[in-house]
Structure formats: C-alpha cells, structure tokens
Image (spheres, helix red, strand yellow):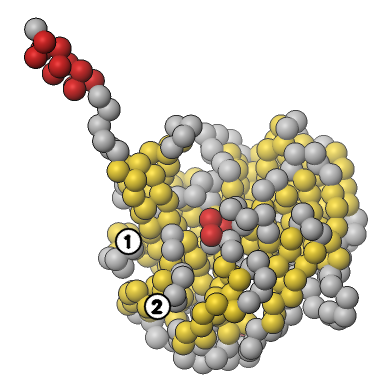
Amino acid sequence: MIRTLSLLLIAALPATAETITATRLVIADHAAPRIVVADEAGAPLLRLDTAEPARLHAGLHRGQVALREGTLGRVTLLETGLRLDGHGDHGDLHLAAPARLPLELRGPRPSHVVGAHGRLGVFFDGDGSVSLIESGKEEAPTRLSAAHAHHGVAFPFISTAGSRVALSEAVAPGERPSAVSLRDAAGAELARREDCPRLHGEAQTGPLIAFGCADGVLLLDAGSGEFRKIANPPGTGERMVRNLAGGEDWRLLLGDFGPDAMVVVDPDAGTMRVVPLPARRLHFALDPARADTGFAMTEDGMLHAFSTLDGAPRQRVQATGRYSLEGGSAVARPRLSAAGGLVAVSDPAAGRVALHDAETLALQRVVETGGAPFDIRLVSLTGERH
C-alpha cells in the first residue's frame, strides 16, 4: 500500500521543465520575391515565394513577422514557429514549423506597419486609411482613416480605458504629417497634439509611445492619454529623429540623428543624448530585451556596439565590405537585427547573412543565401519546455 501510494505521488508530480531560448532568422531578398526562415544554426526551415520583394515588420506577437508588399498593396502574417504561452510566473515555449497565414490586409501603398502586444496597425499612404487587427480577431479588422492621404503611421495600443490608436495627421493631401490624433476603437478623436513637424518613426518603451519630429520626440502616455515633448539638444541644426526603437528592460529610446549620429532618449529625465558615429550610418538596431547596448552599421562596413546608458563605444568589428550611400533605395545595403544575444548583419553584395555575438561582436556563423539578402529579422524567445 505504501509503495502504491508513493508511485501515485511520483506520477502526480509535474514533469521537469527546461528553460531554453529558441531563435529564428527571417530573410527577405532585395530584388527577388522570396522569404527564407532559418533556425539559429542557419538551416532553412521555410522558403516562401511572394508576389514582389517584401519588407519585414513586427507582427501581433513576438514569434510573428508581418510581410509588406508595397506595390501590390498587401500585408500578410508569417508565423516563425515560435510562440510563448504565459502562465503567470513563466511562459511555455512552443516550437512548430514556420507558416504564412491566409489573412491579407489590403490597401493602396502600405507603409508603416506597427505590431505589439496582440495588436497590429497598417497605414496605407495611398488613401490615408488604416487597418487594425488584434489577436483572436484577425478575421475582423477595423478600418479607420486619417483626414488626408500622407506617408503616415497608426500605432494601436491598450489604455486603462480600452483600445486606442495614435494616428498621424497631415494638413493637406501629400503633405508630411505634423500632428498625432488619439482615437478610440470606433475612430472618435479623444485628443490631438499638433506640434510634431515632419513626423516620422515610432516606437514604445514602457507605457510611452514615441514619434520622431523635426524638433524633438513626441511622447504619448498609453495609460493616461497625455502628450509631452522632448526637444532636440541645442545646436543640433537640421538633424532629426527619423527612426526609433524602444527598450523593455530599460526605459529608453534609440533613434537615428542625422547621417552620422545616434540619439538616446531618456523619457524619465526628459533628455536626448547624441552618440556620434565615426562614419555615415547604414542602419541601426536595438534588442529591446537588452537595451543597454545599441548597434549601428556604417558605410565602411564596420559594425559598432555602444552603450545606450552613457554613449561610450563598446566593440566594433569589420562585418562587411564598404557600401556606397549613393543611389537611394535602389541599392541594397546591409541591415541589422538584434535578439537572443545575437546581432544579424545582411550582406547583399556577398549573398549572405552573418550572425555575431551581441556582447563581443565575434562572428558566430554565416548563413549563405545567395541573391541579395536585405531586410532581416531575428526572432528569439525564452521559455520552458516540458
């Protein structure tokens, strides 16, 4: 009887869980209409044909990537095969094969695609319309519209009062946006801020949603719905933030700032710290989960790591050959993505993607893709596997 009871108690104990980190790499070619999803060893898991070369954005959750086909006017969702199910004090990590979902969001000239926390917003420059979806209700998108068509952005989020979206606004069709309208789920305007000239770039850190402006960074508190502004540092001339990334473990924002500098925004202190680069920048990245380090790629092929806390250089390594900044978007240049202790660098001229250690910048492995690998996205999740 005692032995039987012991066996029953052992059988009732939960299986030992192992905490692991899994990483997937999504690669989009600059000219060819194809997407490759590879595992952390570089082995291809999925080769996907698209109608045109696609660009990559965050999806509804961390294991998902949005694919934007701008000329076609379509945004679709790609599951990388990684997903976390939260259980309070931990998350269960699920691994599966990558797959493209059948959902399509369509409209003229999709531009900025913003995804986070189970919500995704697509702004269509051609008519100023917006498609909004949320997890579990993907087949019932909400459609809103700005007052005028422009190159804009819609940032969906949840406030204490319910679903909200921050929407850029322009004073006339085709003009650069200069305002942000706070809307409810039905599209009714709740508040507006008019002083964000040449608005471009968006990110979130903590409860704060940020937009780049010609003269600073506009912040929207997702909880209270209140706006405030941090001005550019004195003497910075025509420099402005055009692209932003937000930290999670640190409340900070990293942005580009003119051709050869970065800027770190401390929203709590209300300051912007300029971090100069030794050459003109090609691209930059921030791992939101390890936001004390920023990464930038310069035209001489150097990959730089620097502290976002004090601006000090940390490491640098020759990652690619030299790339010209001439020729605009017709020229494929390296791009960066950082996650899971890795920094990925696309090298279109060499037909490969290199993975570097995020702390030392030592080369870990090379993924030979052929073609001109351009836009890349590292997806890394840590959780328990039973």
Left or right: where 227 falls relative to 356 = right
Residue 247 in picture, x, y percent from top left: 62, 57
Residue 349: name its quadrant. Answer: bottom left
Q: Is residue 105 above or below residue 276?
A: above
Residue 81 seen in render: no
Residue corresponding to mark 1:
39
> Callout 1, which amino acid?
Asp
Q: Is residue 266 above or below residue 159?
A: below
Q: Residue furthest top?
A: 1
Residue 157 seen in render: yes
Residue 56 in picture, x, y percent from top left: 52, 62
Foreground: disc 1 or disc 2: 2
Q: Could you tell me which residue is drawn at 36 percent across and 54 percent down?
A: 22
> Callout 2, which amino acid?
Ala
Residue corresponding to mark 2:
362
Q: Foreground residue, 370 or 292?
A: 292
Q: Foreground residue, 139 or 113?
A: 113
Q: Residues within 10 Å of mark 1 (few under 14, many from 20)?
A: some
Left or right: where 169 falls relative to 341 = right
Left or right: where 277 falls relative to 44 = right
Q: Foreground residue, 15 or 24?
A: 15
Residue 300: name its quadrant. Answer: bottom right
Q: Residues within 10 Å of mark 2 (few under 14, many from 20)?
A: some
Secondary-structure class at tag 1: strand
Q: Could you tell me which residue is drawn at 33 percent across and 63 percent down?
A: 40
Q: Could you tell me which residue is drawn at 73 percent across and 64 percent down?
A: 265
Residue 243: name its quadrant. Answer: bottom right
Q: Could you tell me which residue is drawn at 80 percent across and 64 percent down?
A: 271
Secondary-structure class at tag 2: loop
Which of the image's four quarters has the N terminus?
Answer: top left
Mark 2 or mark 1, which is nearer the start of the sequence? 1
Residue 222 in picture, x, y percent from top left: 74, 43
